[in-house]
Image: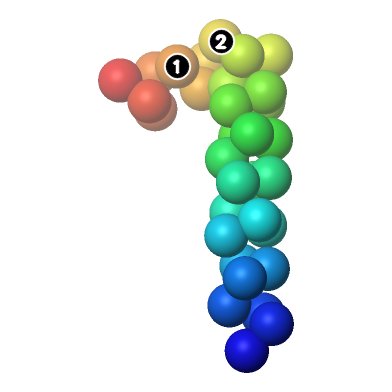
Amino acid sequence: MITAAVLPLYQALLMGLLQGVTELFPVSSLGHA
């Protein structure tokens, strides 16, 4: 049951990491668009 509360945390971290990577790599903007 604890994992249910931990999942959102991991998702938030992943999203933050993805955003940081997309900012570093302008090429990723193409995939975003």
Residue 31 in sight in this render: yes
Looking at the rendering, which quadrant does residue 17 occupy?
Answer: top right
Q: Residues within 10 Å of mark 2 (few under 14, many from 20)?
A: few
Query: Which residue, given by chain and number where applicable, does mark 1 sit on?
Result: 29
What amino acid is found at the position of numbered circle 2 in the picture? Pro
| Residue picked out by circle 2 | 26
**The N terminus appears in which quarter of the rendering?**
bottom right
Quick check: 27 above or below 15?
above
Q: Looking at the image, which residue is at 64% across and 34% down?
A: 16
Q: Nearer the viewer, residue 9 or 18?
A: 9
Residue 24, position as x, y percentages in the image: 69, 14
Looking at the image, residue 26 sits to the left or right of residue 30; the answer is: right
For the residue carrying disc 1, how many other residues have a C-alpha within 10 Å: few (<14), some (14-19), or many (20+)?
A: few
Helix, strand or loop status at disc 1: helix
Q: Is residue 22 above or below residue 16?
A: above
Q: Nearer the viewer, residue 25 or 18?
A: 18
> What residue appears at the point 51 percent right and 22 percent down from the top-left corner?
28
Would residue 27 appear left or right of 9 to someone viewing this image?
left
- Quarter-of-image position of residue 11: bottom right
Residue at screen point 60% across, 46% down: 12
The residue under the point 58% across, 77% down is 4
> What is the residue that sits farthest to the bottom in this orientation?
1
